[in-house]
Image (cartoon, coloured by chain):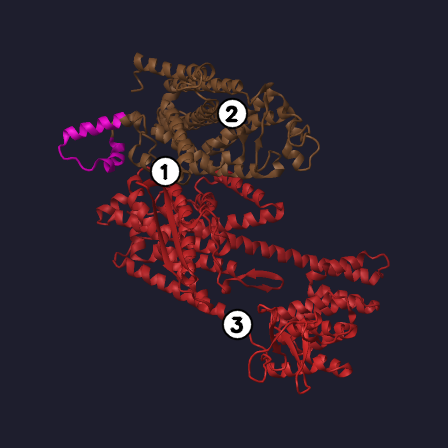
Chain colours: A red, B brown
Amino acid sequence: MSGLCRAKYLPLSDQRGGAWCSALGLFMRLGVLLLAWAAFGCFWCSSAETPDVAAVRRKLAQAILAEGSEQQKLLAELSDSGSKFAAEVFTAWLRDGVYIYSSTDGSKIPVLLEETQDTEGKSRALRIDNGEFLKDPQGADLHFASSDLSPADTDMRLRSTIQQTIDTLTLSDPNPTARRSGVLKFGNSQKTGYIPLLQKKLSGEKESEVKKAIQEAIALLQLSSTDTKVQVAAVDELGRLKSIGSLDRLRALAAKRDCPPEILRSAKRATAAIQDHLWWVNFFGTIFHGLSLGSILLVVALGLAITFGLMGIINMAHGEMIAVGAYACYVVQNLYGAGFGFSITLPFSFGSKPISFGLHLPGLNASGWFYESYFLVALPLSFLSAALAGLVIERTVIRFLYRRPLESLLATWGVSLVMQQCFRMVFGANNVQVNSPSWLLGHFSVNDLILGYNRLFVICFGLLIVFATWLLLAKTPLGLLIRAVMQNRGMAACLGVRTSRINMLTFAFGSGLAGLAGAFLSQIGNVGPSLGQTYIVDSFMTVVLGGVGSIMGTVGSAMGIGTADQVLQQTTGSPVTGKIVVLLTIIVFLQWKPGGLFSTRGRTLD
Amino acid sequence: MRSGVTTAEKWVLAICALMLVLIIPSLNAFTPEGFFHVSDFSINLYGKYLCYAILAISVDMLWGYTGLLSLGQALFFALGGYMFGMYLMRMIGSLGQYHQPIPDFLVFLGWHNLPPFWRPFSSFSFALMMAFVLPGLVALIFGYLAFRSRIRGVYFSILTQALTYAACLLFFRNNLFMGGNNGFTDFKFLLGYDLRSPATQRALYMVTAVTLVLIFLGCRWLTRTKFGLLQQAIRDSENRVLFSGYAAGNYKLFIFVLCALIAAIGGTLYVPQVGIINPSEMAPEKSLEAVVWVAVGGRGTLIGPIIGAVVVNALKSWTTRAFPDIWLLFLGALFVLVTAFMPKGIVGLPEQFRGLAKRLKAKPLPPPAPHQTPCAEPSQSNPDQHFAKTK
């Protein structure tokens, strides 16, 4: 047997049962990791509420009613509050949406009118000072049309102060991202008057990203200064900060005809530094995109590496296994929401009645974190449903074609056509939308490099799946049997291995991996009946390039193809050219290494 | 069956050929409306089927006779079609939507002059030459690379599929100046004859039928020469052929290029009859469909692909009209059933039934027949019927 054992295979040493148990264990471990991931995501998304709403409300009401310098002072105080509500009131104020209600006892109450109107075009009035609705003495809500009330007074000066207050409010927003975008708005305003305000904020700021943004904004504002020394310092500062956003301003500054030489020198230096930085950011961005694309390819091709590479079955329906997984996600999502149902009417009729059948499953109507968690249920289900589909195909079609690989290609293509049409009949010919859970939607940035959570998730999970597959094949009894059957079917059968059962399980496992890939793809794009077709040629190329039968080769070639594709997309500026070049390169590459990247060495000719 | 063709069989073939070439067109031209009349629409449709039959022969010469399952034959078909389509586009002249002397899609893309590589295509003979040269060249380069590094079996299939996929993506691009997504359409004249007149279509049908018969006879002759024997030897055991001192790679390259040319002829005749050529003609599915025709008709025979192409396409025309929703279900199921239970296709059915009958006679209680058929195939004795057994 050892003669037949090729280098890549691990020695067949241990012969214990319990293949199912260890597979189950692996799966549970996978689940725990996923849960941890989810918890992390939830934590990340939560953010603090406004500090002391009641005080802000009182002060707002005062500010609206006050006049002159008193009003200016109150507004300045409010601009530090960081309250979202205050921002809303101010915006409404600018649009004359804040009204003054004079009550019977002579006091004046500032109110907002609700957006929902009753049949007479009237709506309830929300008191700004305590957040309750205005009531008559009996306790019933009062309704007003906008013409019933007088809007709060504004004049030019007040309006500009209010606008400034709104802008400043964003600077104390509790959410760092909102704070940062507020700062950037200031930086591009070209109003040097904001510099002292920003400098005050800078000293109180703790988030390093926001801090950097404030420094950038200050320097950008200083560019408009009349003092050459300040300008030079600002240019140097921008260069030091490697501020990509200021590149255009710096170029414009250097291009000015009357630009003093010292500024020109600094600007050139700063522009060079920023461009250098930009190049690196783009470089790593491309690599990151390439890796995430590679990971998708990897997960898609890994299942194929098992069914095609290990078993020698050309499963053209592999793409449809991907679609099965993606649609499983869709169904689970709908079951968590409003429910799922379909009905099919066949074009034949039986007697006078057309034959039709359908199914309707009620949904859970979940919301909040419970709804978000649907993906965690969908992941294992997409694996299981695709594995089941694979099992059925193996038992009904492929089992007869193990000795005729070319014909398995044709028969499975037939299966793929049938499955595509079934998807069309059940889910409709149009794409369906699978919503990403919110913990996969955001992104974070490291040094201007933006990393999306969904792409990160795909990379991490791709690596996890490769690791799990390797564990299954190399460390479990089931994996041992799989390798034995794939290396020498006849010998394994002689030793008492039930080869047909192993074939079935291996094929189901490979299909299940395709289902997982489908779950990923549903998070990245839309899900349609021909989803699998998009990836089938790519994934076959990945397996062939990697070297048939080698899991490591598949990893290498998937990452290589993904990265090359992205780099070529960047350099040629067109996604299609990149793809064509990659395909042709692979064809030429196989000239040099016909067995793929990690080819196995054997002495047999056939 | 093939080694000793009886005179009767020759007569049957000759009558079929006569029927195709002369009788169907005369039924179109000379009979009044009625049962025997072949409508203009039908003759156009038959012409399309015959083009597909030519493509099917090229697939079969590779797959059935040489054991090379090429999933890229539609590429050569479409390339031939595109080259000839360029000539037809030039023949539109200023009669297009925009009334400009250059093809409409170029006007649409904002061009005022013809791109240089389009210019020679105003000549019929140049376009016809290119319809052979380009597919032949592509096949030569790809085949040289593939066979030199001894890519075979399923790898060959996957690579040819990748090639046609890459070409398909390429032709979808607008800046190739080949019509992009919409391809070429709205043809008007061929050698001065109006393409929309029934007489031209009838003539085109006749040319197609004659070409098909000639290709059939040519391939029949080729498969009976020493070359043909070698071709089948390569299919059955390439290594033994190599060890016997034959450069199997060169033989394969020759047949690959030859089949690319045959497919290109099909494409060239297809475009003026169907009136449109676009990149979806070279999509990987199209090549697979051509393989289905061969599988259904019966590979390893030359009449099989013709029967398969006509039968499957006629079926397709009917189902897509009668039950548009389930056409794919039907095609898929047909495919699975044919590959699993009818390895020799329609042509092989009588033999299969004879074998079944023999077994029924031998054993009073046989095991369930359909499951046995595919598994029993490798042990059958006729070496000619051994299909590509790639390990």
Quarter of the image where one finds residue A91:
bottom right
Q: Which residue is mark 1?
A: B330
Could you say where residue A262 lies in the image, as x and y percent from the top left? 82, 63
Is A93 situated above or below A553? below
Q: Is residue B65 left or right of residue A89?
A: left
> In the rendered structure, are the residues bearing label 3 and label 1 in contact, judged by CB atoms less than 8 Å apart?
no
Identify the residue shown where x is 14% and y is 35%: B365
Q: Which residues are magenta?
A: B350-379
Q: Is residue B14 left or right of residue A593?
A: left
Tell me, yes or no, whether the highlighted magenta stretch contains residue A169: no
Circle 2 residues within 10 Å: few <14, some 14–19, many ≥20: many
Could you say where residue A548 lies in the image, as x and y percent from the top left? 40, 44
Name the secondary structure under disc 3. loop
Q: Which mark is residue B273?
A: 2
- Is residue A600 among the parts visible in the rendering? no
Residue type beneath disc 3: Ser
Front-lying residue, B235 or B93: B93
Identify the residue shown where x is 70% and y is 69%: A95
Q: Is residue A49 left or right of residue A222?
A: left
Label 2 lies in what chain?
B
Q: Which mark is residue A591?
A: none
Q: Which residue is mark 3?
A: A46
Asked if both marks, 1 and 2, belong to the same chain, the answer given is yes
Label 1 lies in what chain?
B
Residue type beneath disc 2: Gln
Give how far apart the Cα atoms at labels 1 and 2 are: 27 Å
Q: Residue furthest front?
A: A120
Give how far apart the Cα atoms at labels 3 and 2 are: 65 Å
Front-lying residue, A26 or A165: A165
